[in-house]
Image (tube, rainbow, N blue to C red):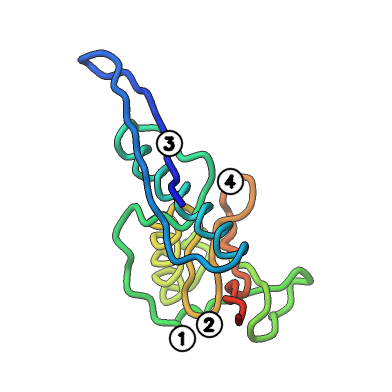
Amino acid sequence: MKISKLAIAKDSSGLVRYDVMLEVSDLQSAAEVTDAKVRAEKMIDGWLAGSVHLAPKSPGPVQTGEIPQIDIAELDALPWLAKNKEKPEQGAWGWVLSDPEKHTKENAATVLKVRAAIQAYNGTVTLGEYDFKFNGDKDQFIHRCPAKQERAR
């Protein structure tokens, strides 16, 4: 399967055309094709955004920066809350405030690392058994949910 995108941008020399094509192979199921298509499109959007200073259409797992080292135990130690504002069960959905100033010194460092990882992966990152992303109209929360597992064939 081939995925291609085109972007046209204006720079100091005039209009510049960017054509990007990515080929994906070894796909066996319809779910793999759909997943590969979405990932390829997001990857291309990320490349084009870096080349022509356009924002990607949607956040996704495109690595755009350096990922800090994060200890999973530190992640688990954050004060995660469920919808009812109680501690969620292990492996369940949860949220914490994304402002490091709202946390203890130790937790603030972890929150900063998670924020950097989310930003480096253009909006969503998988760490351990969870997917992490910002939530709220001003990204005031870090949201975690169980990572999507690959289906057995």
Q: Mark 1: which amino acid?
A: Ala
Location of mark 1 (residue): 73
Q: Residue at x 58, y 54 (%)?
A: 140
Q: Residue furthest left?
A: 13
Q: Report whether 48 appears left or right of 13.
A: right
Counting residues from the start of the chain, the first of labels 1 and 3 encountered is 3
Residue shown at 47% from the left, 47% from the top = 41
Say whether disc 1 or disc 4 marks the residue closer to the N-terminus.
1
- Cα–Cα span, label 1 and label 2: 5 Å
* Label 2 packing within 10 angstroms: few (<14), some (14-19), many (20+): few
Q: Which residue is mark 4?
A: 138
Q: Which mark is residue 76?
A: 2
CB atoms of marks 1 and 2 within 8 Å: yes
User: In the image, is residue 8 above or below residue 119?
Assistant: above
**Residue in front for this viewpoint, 80 or 150:** 150
Say what amino acid the circle numbered 2 marks: Asp
Rendering quarter of residue 117: bottom left
Alpha-carbon neighbours of circle 4 within 10 Å: few (<14), some, or many (≥20)?
few
Tag 2, which secondary structure?
helix
Real-space CA distance between mark 4 and mark 2, rounded to the nearest whole angstrom = 24 Å
Q: CA distance from mark 4 to mark 3?
A: 30 Å
Give x and y (percent) for residue 16.
Answer: 29, 21
Please tell me which residue lies in front, 48 or 104. 48
For marks 3 and 2, the one nearer the N-term is 3
Would you say the residues marked 3 and 2 are in contact, meaning their CB atoms lie under 8 Å apart?
A: no
Give the residue at mark 3. 5
Crowding at mark 1 (Cα within 10 Å: few <14, some 14-19, many 20+):
few
Instruction: For marks 1 and 4, give the CA distance.
Output: 27 Å
Quadrant position of residue 67: bottom left
For image coordinates 76% across by 68% down, the residue present is 83
